[in-house]
Image (tube, rainbow, N blue to C red):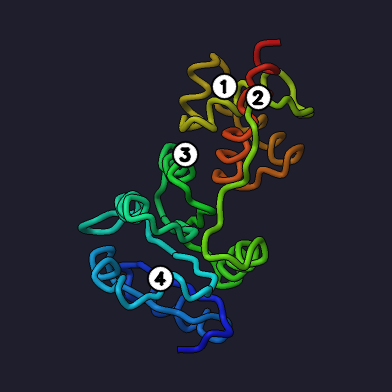
Amino acid sequence: MKTNKSRVIIVEDDIALKQSLTDWLSSDYEVSNFDSAELFLNALNDFEFEDGIPTCILLDFQMSGMTGVELQSTLKLMNIDYPIIFMSGNAQQADIVDAWRGGAIDFLLKPFSGAQVSQALTAIFNKSTKIKLDKPQQDPKVAVDIPISQREAEVLLLLGTGNRQVEVARQLNITLRTVKMHRANLKNKLGLNTLFDLTRYCDLYASSIEKIAKS
């Protein structure tokens, strides 16, 4: 086994996608792939957890048998703390919240390009050369200056806790179009381009956002 490359473990039950990802990433990483969470768990003894090779798991969110989230929970119970990038074609905001709070590093929505995968992996491996990559440590009680309006803060809090845009509109008694406008403003002001970005930001700065929402 080569030791000069970072390692990527792909767990994906779409055979064509799994093979495409393997072909795309093999020139830059050591790649292992599995058709199911169960097969990956059965092969855990093949990996040397203390070999010092930075490792990331590309994990399908919804699979037959054990799901990606269930595998994430199982690995945590086993004290196996590889960073996880989830992949999904139909994930809802609540799913992304659960994945983030379970320790996921990123969330790719299908269909995605090989370049997007490479960019996500590069960002992770550039953060640390350790196997274990922790979520950014942020004291939620520390106030930060967030340049958003009261209504934008309300929308951010609701979206960040798993509500869909139509649910946000109903709870705030505003139109769906208005919610989408505020979502666009949050993207432009805070660089929250994806649902995962939004969830992570809301989780890290909840107290500051709540303060703005109540002002």
Q: Nearer the viewer, residue 100 or 87?
A: 100
Q: Which residue is mark 3?
A: 97
Tell me the tag on residue 141: 2
Furthest-top residue in view? 215
Q: Nearer the viewer, residue 209 or 134?
A: 134
Which x, y percent locates residue 135? 57, 48
Q: Which residue is mark 4?
A: 10
Q: Is residue 39 left or right of residue 161?
A: left
**Dot 2: what SS?**
loop
Q: Label 1 is placed on what type of residue?
A: Thr
Furthest-bottom residue in view? 1
Q: Label 3 is placed on what type of residue?
A: Val
Please name which of the two marks, 1 or 2, marks the residue nearer to the observer. 2
Spatial separation of the CA atoms under disc 4 and disc 1:
41 Å
- The vertical placement of 82 against 168, above or below, is below
Q: Label 2 is placed on what type of residue?
A: Lys
Residue at 48% x, 73% y: name it: 8
Q: Which residue is mark 1?
A: 175
Mark 3 / mark 4, whichever is N-terminal: 4
Q: Residues within 10 Å of mark 1 (few under 14, many from 20)?
A: some
Count of numbered circles on the image: 4
Mark 4 / mark 1, whichever is N-terminal: 4
